[in-house]
Image (cartoon, helix red, strand yellow):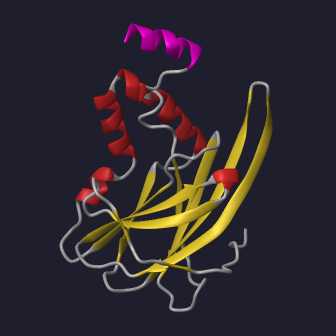
Amino acid sequence: MALCLASMAVGGCTYSQINPEAALEDIRTNNGYYELKSVEPGTAKLVLRTPGAVATSAAAQYAVSTAEAPCEGFQHLGAAASSGHGVVYPWIARATRVGSGAEPFLVHEATPGQPIQVRGIGKWSTGGANIAFQHGSCGPEVVRFTPQADRAYAVEFIWGKGMSCRLAVMDATDPDAPQPVASRPVPGCPAPAR
């Protein structure tokens, strides 16, 4: 512990190394874990989140549509961003989240058996002391799948190498053992007009 605190002063130790139980609880509270565990009978729930972004600041804007036509009828849900819960101290993660204006996760009640399109558009920025400011975006990424009754789904905006991105859909009714869901990419959807 003393070594970890000393190395933290230099910048090498994480909150999860200092207090693993509290860090796990901080992650679960702020990534939709408990929402995934509470699905009302006969319903389907989506938890939309943006885990582990590689940039200093990265968020995804989410929208959903039940229109039959691809790329049409999207309803904006809001922005979700990972702010370091479970890695940095909770007060730092909260301050980062408040500064970004994004929520740690979003929840959407879907109609079981009705196909749904989910759109994610990511925005990132880096910068700080002695670091040049850079910014960019990725997407829109759109996937279509059919939620089933009594199931909870995690829809994640995944940042990749070189700030590439994709959407992943998982059946997370058991959030400790999420399973990939058959989803179909919907290519060519335009970004929404500002």
Q: Relative to 31, does residue 137 appear above or below in the rendering?
A: below
Q: Principal SS element in the magenta part?
A: helix
Horizontal side of residue 33 vs 125, given as left or right: left
Residue 61: x %, y % from top left? 58, 61
Q: How many marks?
A: 0
Q: Nearer the viewer, residue 193 or 55?
A: 55
Q: Position of residue 169 (x, y in %)?
A: 43, 68
Quarter of the image for residue 147 reads bottom left
- Could you say where residue 65 lies in the image, as x and y percent from the top left? 50, 80
User: Residue at the left extreme?
Assistant: 41
Q: Position of residue 2 (x, y in %)?
A: 40, 7
- The quadrant where residue 140 appears: bottom right
Of residues 172 and 69, which is closer to you in this image?
A: 172
Asked whether 38 falls inside the magenta stretch, the response is no
Q: Quadrant of the C terminus?
A: bottom right
What residue sits 70% from the left and 72% below the top? 191
Relative side of 158 to 43, left or right: right
Using the image, determine if residue 40 lies above or below residue 130: below
Magenta residue span? 1-11
Question: Could you tell me which residue is drawn at 21 percent across and 68 percent down?
Answer: 40
- Does the magenta portion include 7? yes
Q: Residue furthest right?
A: 132
Q: Residue at x 38, y 82 (%)?
A: 146
Residue sitting at 47 percent across and 84 percent down?
66
